[in-house]
Amino acid sequence: MNHFHEDLQAIYEEMVGWRRYLHQHPELSYHEYQTAEFVAKHLLSWDIEVRTGVGGNGVVGLLRGNGEGPTVALRADMDALPIQDEKNCDYTSTKNGIMHACGHDAHTSTLLGIAKVASMHRTELKGNLVFLFQHAEEISPGGADSMIKDGALDGVDAVFGVHLWTPFPVGHVYTRSGAFMAAPDEFTIRVQGKGGHGGLPHQTIDSVYVASQLVVNLQAIVSRQVDPVEPCVVSVGSFHGGTSFNVIAETSVLNGTVRTFNPELRQEVRTRMERIVQATCDMSQATYELEYKLGYPTVINDVNEAARFFQVGSALFGEEAVHESPLIMAGEDFSYYLQEKPGCFMFVGAGNVDAGIVYPHHHPKFDIDERSMLNAANLLLSMALDYMA
């Protein structure tokens, strides 16, 4: 296995080059046309069987090994975010208002590196490798579900994925058995009041006032209605109401998210939210519309494959660099793959305080310590090879 790692090290600079090119040319969810073409072109150049347009803009590569053995899928996401890149570097995004602010450019480049090295040693593989280059991870319903329905996991025995994660330091890797990442739901509440003059509030139904009460009242779900040992988040992320200082707004709109791990709690929070919204609006004789959109399922790692991570990770990086992750309240549509096949989703540290790489994911100045790509490549490939052994 050492020669696999040596070859990954040898193409590290090439992986960095791919990542920086993709960082300069990001594409939003469901618009990853050039990125998918970039991926397919490289896979074909290494004599890997390629399917394009899988479930949308997905690309699936199949590398057949020597003889019979299991088929292991490795996944990377390709889409960027509608964020203005504020970094001052030579690979800043060239597209106004679009950037890779979550590391998907690096995920794609990491998996390309694995594909290239594995293709060089295909006769040594005791099974097959499937490379899942997924579109639209950032927007629900996401690309995983549609790719699965289009056959991306057909014949696959296990699936693994990584996320480069700047809150964790470079050189360290993390996961946990069972529930790992939350189910992320989205809600929109439209409060309908009665507009009027700012100096005559008694003649109106103030939607801003009612919506403000909702922001406060919704916090009671977590603080007073959910068991304190159950992880749960209810966050209002945006509040839009009013157009002028002297006008009572007729309508106000709240948009936010609910994060849970427990399916029963997930439904309970939704029910309680409906009651709170109705009661709060009734108090002021306002009406409302509540749209509640279920997001991705909880990411639940297979017990045996999580155990494999700790064994493989310790051999690669040393036991001191391998950690049981805390629960992560972010969501991931890798959960759909894990509903179909045993596998494990893993975090690879990508932060570096000394280098100023400290900005969180989805931040305009987000960046990674690019050495994390080599760590991720070694981890993913080693998980696959260990499964085949």
Image: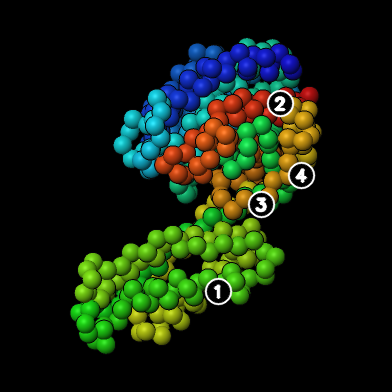
Amino acid beneath label 2: Ser
In the picture, the disc for residue 382 is 2
- The reply to whether residue 76 is in sight is no
Amino acid beneath label 1: Ala
Residue 73 picture location, percent across and down? 63, 31
Instruction: Tell me whether circle 3 and circle 2 mark residues in contact (CB < 8 Å).
Output: no
Q: Residues within 10 Å of mark 3 (few under 14, many from 20)?
A: some
Instruction: Tell me whether circle 3 and circle 1 mark residues in contact (CB < 8 Å).
Output: no
Give the distance between the C-alpha atoms of the residues marked 3 and 4, in whole angstroms.
Answer: 15 Å
Q: Nearer the viewer, mark 2 or mark 1?
A: 1
Q: Is residue 303 above or below residue 207?
A: above
Give the distance between the C-alpha atoms of the residues marked 3 and 1, in whole angstroms.
Answer: 22 Å
> Does label 3 or label 2 sit earlier along the sequence?
3
Q: Secondary structure at mark 4?
A: helix
Please indicate whether residue 362 sits to the left or right of residue 11 in the image: left
Mark 4 sits on what residue? 303
Q: Residue at x 73, y 35 (%)?
A: 321
> Does label 2 or label 1 sit earlier along the sequence?
1
Mark 1 sits on what residue? 220
Give the distance between the C-alpha atoms of the residues marked 2 and 4, in whole angstroms.
Answer: 18 Å
Q: Residue at x 38, y 43 (%)?
A: 83
Residue 132 picture location, percent across and down? 56, 31
Q: Residue at x 32, y 75 (%)?
A: 207
Q: State which quadrant residue 118 falls in.
A: top right
Amino acid beneath label 4: Val
> Does label 4 or label 1 sit earlier along the sequence?
1
